[in-house]
Image: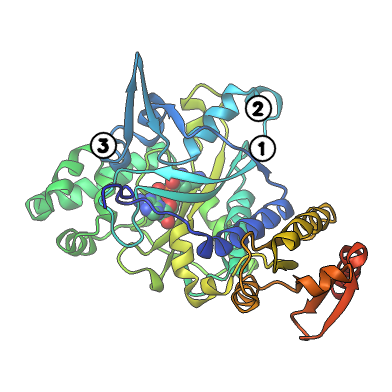
Amino acid sequence: MEYRIVRGTKDILPGEIGVWQEIEEKTRRIFALYNFREIRTPLLEDIKLFNRSLGEASEVVQKQMFVINRDDDVLVLRPEGTASVARAWVENGFDKEEHFGKFFYIGPMFRAERPQKGRLRQFHHIGCEVIGSVSPSLDIEVISLLRCILSEIGVRDFRIKINSLGCSRDKAGLSEVMRGALRDKKDGLCRDCQARYDRNVLRIMDCKSRQCRQLVDSVKIFENYLCPGCRGHFDKVLSGLGDLGIEYEVSSRLVRGLDYYTGTVFEVSSGLLGAQDVLCGGGRYDNLISEIGGSTRGAVGFAIGVERAIIAMGAKALESSGTPLDVYIIPLSEEALKTGSKILYNLRLKKLASDMDYEVRSLKANMRKANESNAKFVIILGDDELRQNAAALKDMRSGGQEMVPLDNVVGVISERIAISSV
Ligand code: HAM
């Protein structure tokens, strides 16, 4: 075929859309329970925003940005949402006027990665960002929110890993500890990690190559790189999660790949995912707002990768089949098509989801389509029915069929659907 979809992107076809809609509806409801407001930022941003916030040495900036050179602007397709929300927070005056805000977003992100299972070049995030407080209660709130979303959409076997990188100074200290510990082992690292050793040594800790994993595992990391303030914050987060009965695993090797993180960081993984086993990542980024021109404000958030979440839902993902029709109309003649169009119009005015076959076909072929549409009622318009100014109304649940006057058919169906939904 001459025209094919771009590798690493996916058509989400009508057969799969049910699960997407269900996930989105459920998460929107939960965000409302937690008093988060939706924000939609552009897919295009200035490259400088990500260079500054994610860090020039981060994998995303180094290798994964889709860059568009246009006149004097260098734009990118956004690789993530945190930096965009932070920009919008400062640019739209929230920083001066509101001082505190809870936002969520749902939408596509773009990373020029080598595609494989669970790793796409266009994928989707359900994300949230809370800006304006350094309280450990917010770390607890976003992790409880995350757990609530995952359980509600049907992700079962997941593990929450958590760590603290500490403040900028602690993070620099941790980098030094790592550099010292790996100095003699540098030659054994993969080529990418040899470069990371100088540029961004913490990234070596989550390199997936076996040789680097073994080396990193052989290095002891002591948590005493945390200053008393950061240690205290982290202890409060852990005990708060314990109070809520949220299970977690502290992992001193969890560092996250984006430079803006400080303090608490966390990831969620699932055994159903294979090599790309992380379905959500998040954490604090207390310096980002001031780094891009706002005030010094604590902030914390996470993003769930929707495609990976769907894989982690396993069989549950197949259960969502989308919204069924209320009514399907079968016209058996050209005349019936005209009558069908009128009924269809009136059904939709009554907010009843309905459709019909726009070609005249045999009753058998039409009934097959009606069954596929999962409609609750079928209206059959044949010559006999039209002669009597009536329609045959079939209740697909009970199988019963009756003649109903044409001018009454919409009313009858409305009533029955209203009764059955009480
Ligand atoms: P991230 O860990 O880079 O974090 O991405 C979050 C999630 O997006 C990952 O856990 C993964 O499920 C999914 N994901 C990432 N890359 C791909 C890909 N190429 N294909 C499919 N799924 C992918 C962030 O983006 C941060 N902005 C999260 C955050 C929000 N931190 C604070 N607030």
Q: Measured along the vertical axis of the image, is residue 277 above or below residue 293?
A: below
Residue 269: which quarter of the image? bottom left
The CA span between labels 1 and 2 is: 8 Å
Image marks 1 and 2: residues in contact by CB distance under 8 Å: yes
Closer to the camera, 243 or 403?
403
Residue in the picture at 89% in, 73% down: 404
- Crowd rating for badge 3 (residues with CA inside 10 Å; few <14, some 14–19, many 20+): few
Q: Which mark is residue 94?
A: 2
Query: Which one is earlier in the sequence, the residue at label 3 or at label 2?
Result: 3
Element class at badge 2:
helix
Is residue 361 placed above or below 345 in the rendered structure? Answer: below
Residue type indicated by callout 1: Gly
- How far separated are the C-alphas under marks 3 and 1? 31 Å
In the rendered view, how is the structure colored?
A: rainbow
Report the disc number at residue 307: none
Amino acid on which disc 2 is placed: Phe
Which is nearer the eye, 328 or 207?
328
Q: Position of residue 36 (x, y in %)?
A: 68, 46
Residue 248 pos. (x, y %)? 50, 67
Disc 3 marks a residue whose amino acid type is Gln
Relative to residue 259, is residue 209 drawn left or right? left
Disc 1: CA contacts within 10 A as few (<14), some (14-19) or many (>=20)? some
Cα separation between marks 3 and 2: 31 Å
Which residue is tagged 1? 101
Q: Dot 3: what SS?
A: helix
Q: Residues within 10 Å of mark 2 (few under 14, many from 20)?
A: some
Q: Which residue is mark 3?
A: 62
CB atoms of marks 3 and 2 within 8 Å: no
